[in-house]
Image (cartoon, coloured by chain):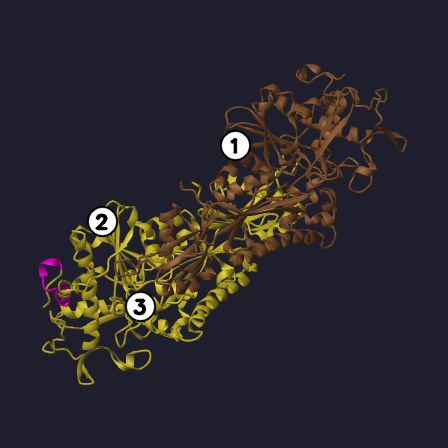
Chain colours: A yellow, B brown
Amino acid sequence: MNKTFPLATKFFLELPSPSLQDNTADLDRVVRQLKALTGWETFRIPFDRIPGWVRQIRTARYRVTASVALTPPCARLLDLEPGDTTEKCYGLAVDLGTTRIACQIWDLKSRAPVFETDFENPQTRFGPDILTRIQMAEKPEGLQTLQEAVIRELNRIIREFAASRSLAAENMLALVLAGNTTMIHLFLGLDPYALRREPYIPVVNTLEPLSARELGLTLHPRGPVYIFPNVGSYLGGDILAGIQFSRLNRQESLSLLVDVGTNAEVVLGNSQWLLGCAGAAGPALEGGVAAMGMTAGPGAIEQVRIDPRTREIRFRQIGGGRPAGICGSGLIDLVAEMFLAGLIDIRGKFNGKVKTDRWVEIDGQPAYLLVPADETQNGRPIVFTQIDLDILLRSKAAMYTILTTLVQSVGHGLDEVEQFFIAGAFGNHIDPEKAITIGLLPDLPRERFVPLGNASLQGAAELLLDYRKQEEVRRIAGTITYLEMNVNQDFMNRFSAARFLPHTDLSLFPSVPRPL
Amino acid sequence: MNKTFPLATKFFLELPSPSLQDNTADLDRVVRQLKALTGWETFRIPFDRIPGWVRQIRTARYRVTASVALTPPCARLLDLEPGDTTEKCYGLAVDLGTTRIACQIWDLKSRAPVFETDFENPQTRFGPDILTRIQMAEKPEGLQTLQEAVIRELNRIIREFAASRSLAAENMLALVLAGNTTMIHLFLGLDPYALRREPYIPVVNTLEPLSARELGLTLHPRGPVYIFPNVGSYLGGDILAGIQFSRLNRQESLSLLVDVGTNAEVVLGNSQWLLGCAGAAGPALEGGVAAMGMTAGPGAIEQVRIDPRTREIRFRQIGGGRPAGICGSGLIDLVAEMFLAGLIDIRGKFNGKVKTDRWVEIDGQPAYLLVPADETQNGRPIVFTQIDLDILLRSKAAMYTILTTLVQSVGHGLDEVEQFFIAGAFGNHIDPEKAITIGLLPDLPRERFVPLGNASLQGAAELLLDYRKQEEVRRIAGTITYLEMNVNQDFMNRFSAARFLPHTDLSLFPSVPRPL
């Protein structure tokens, strides 16, 4: 099993014709050749297809294309077509997020991406977050409705891509999907009830690859659907995909991987061990909570600069044009710059004593006017309130506390972390300098921070292109230990200290400049 | 994978309840325990059953019985039931012969046989032999009719057994079946057209175990149906089952295995190599061709003695009572005794010069009256004609020629064969002394002949009781080479010499007494 092939692939076979000297059975003749080509020992054959296939082998005079799924420990013979159809061979990689779904289509022959899309999870219209969707799943037909919403969208993408290339959907051979545990339960139509009730037990963590037909996906009906296994209710397959993509599990040195989505999922480890945990540090950091917050996209302010002397503000929004809101990285920039300009004090409170014409009052509470109404897309001002700031600081404190607790639980210090992988849109947009300034990230040499982009999607694509990653994921899943964060007094003390800017213990952040 | 278990079996699991410390997913909890019990790495789980099973696990408070099929390289989780149902666990072993079907039901927990039956293959009413059934399979719905006839009989046995024990048929977990290549094609509903047309190519030789539902068998719908692989059109899974049962493939010394059914299938080899061939030597030896021939059963003459001086005849029929015909072993006895009494000469011709009142004439041809009309079951005399004799001698000559050719093809002599296994009813009834006398079997020390009984059925039962035999059968199938008997001048010369009694070269049969 040493050659590398995609999870599903096609082989053009020119089989020797049967003779008295070589009277191997027709189907065994196909399997014999596939064994020689792939090194695999066992091929599962769909029994009901045998008569038709054998007729086809004979009619095509033993020149056929075999579609094969390589799903250890068994390969599966998916299809047999007359002649050489190896040019038509595609697969999908999907990152199934709570708010957004990212999808890539790959040409599995040339191993090139041929289509990419990113859209809102259609379940969002039934409930914006995980909890509301779990509640919806408890209503009659709720679970099915949620499941179908996602399946329908994926089928639409498959259909439109196939149509654009005049392909039969049967040429889409495989789908690899990573997501958090709840999204995977909903995708599979499995009851998520127990996921959010102590002791937080998933229905299933690890499944052998399913067939597309079992899920109602309209790729090749027997095409494999590989789903990254979950580690637990709070640590999903998306993080396993991210670990695999980061190579964290192959390195001697200590690394951290942080994936900020709905939750912050954090993994610490090296080639010997992996320790994961998750905490509710996410939404604020993605820009999902602040009143004017938005996810990173056109119109979102992603960078803010405040002159510490003049307090003059400059900002940059994604795609240019008028700003519509502020995304996670923009918020972090904003808080860091306001802090350095003295507009926010070390306790995380607006410092009204520092003069600027941007202080305003909203519902009797102090707020900072980022963009006046007449300069925004929708004519409403973009303001940043003390409440927004409190939420952000709680999130950053939670994140830093989780990181500290995790690293200390194995007797290390944060400064020993050699590589700090940051996955997600968050990782791509964040300026580590600013994140360190507010004490969200530890004060490490900057080159140790490695943004990964959508590590879950890229991990899924890697597995789609190389079946051997299944074994690696299995190993990762078998190695990783979930650390249940024990919210005890010690944790709370750390959390309180981490709510300061950047921290009560400034010796932890030697490189952060002191504010004016 | 070192523990031995049946092909399908039940495990009662008392799982630890989930807790914050052990938050493994419910189904993974089952699989984890099964892995520990069996040593297997991969369990396939039927996706559509997961929601129901997980509800059941929770309702049963984590005390469940798992039904599992051990089909390398994947185990399959067949079912989950609340509580302990391990007492109810059965399986079937089937030898699917062209004329007769033998079936055993085993208690897979106690590993004891609990029911056994043997009945005419219901396809016989559509055609007595393989060729007529292949012709029938070419007619519209012919194949389906033939398939359903056998499935229906097996379902009847399953149903009646289950009813007799007040069991649900779901407690019949597995079926293991061996048969010749044509019978297997018909059983699977696969077109047998190419089996009897050069170059004699089966549709498929080796299949991963099917599920009962795929074949319409009414045992547990997901229960594994293991079918012994074919070697080629003329060498079926029944012979593989026989090899496995004989242990021929595990011995250092040279052994032969002969299974006389519709064809004579012969295997030569040892633990290093296996060479198989098949030839049309069968029907006459089973009593199926002679005018008064019959298969071994009540009323069949199975033993004949002729006093060489008085030529007085004695015989014994199966079950006592009046004789109805003569079976294969009776025919061999008859010819040997007639030969030793001088009634048949060395060329295989009736010797009318030797006086006896049993010479009669039928249609102008000489014949030997074995039982007069008034002593038989149906009032018709049992006679043995020159035509019957010619057919028998051709069969015995074919058998001996096949044995010689096979052994010589690898540079050995028949005298080097240390063990000579004889499978089938033939092996149980035949008297090696008489078979040697007529030159059907080689003149070896008598203790080398080992009757095996229904080796195919017993091999099937062994695999039902020990899943590891699947690997052994796979090795046997991968080791065995089919020797296409090249009917050239050399073969024909040998064949002609072997038509004599016992042979033209008497030095090959030193222990055979010379006739009067």
- Name the residue beneath numbered marker 3: A196
Identify the chain of the residue marked 3, using the numbered disc in the image: A
The percent position of residue A315, horizontal first and vertical second, equals 25, 70
Q: Residue furthest bottom?
A: A364
* Helix, strand or loop at mark 2: loop
Nearer the observer, disc 1 or disc 2? 1
- Name the residue beneath numbered marker 1: B247
Amino acid type, label 3: Arg
Identify the chain of the residue marked 2, using the numbered disc in the image: A
Identify the chain of the residue marked 1, using the numbered disc in the image: B
Q: Nearer the viewer, residue A407 or B255?
A: B255
Q: Nearer the viewer, residue A481 or B480?
A: B480
The crowding category of the residue bearing disc 2, from other C-alpha atoms within 10 Å (few below 14, some 14 to 19, many at least 20), is: many
Per the rendering, the mark at residue B232 is none
Hey, which quadrant is residue A397 in on the image? bottom left
Amino acid type, label 1: Arg
Residue in the picture at 17% in, 65% down: A438
In this picture, which residue range is highlighted in magenta? A493-511
Q: Is residue A126 left or right of residue B377?
A: left
Amino acid type, label 2: Leu
| Placement of A479 over or under B261, stated as above or below | below
Residue B18 visible? The answer is yes
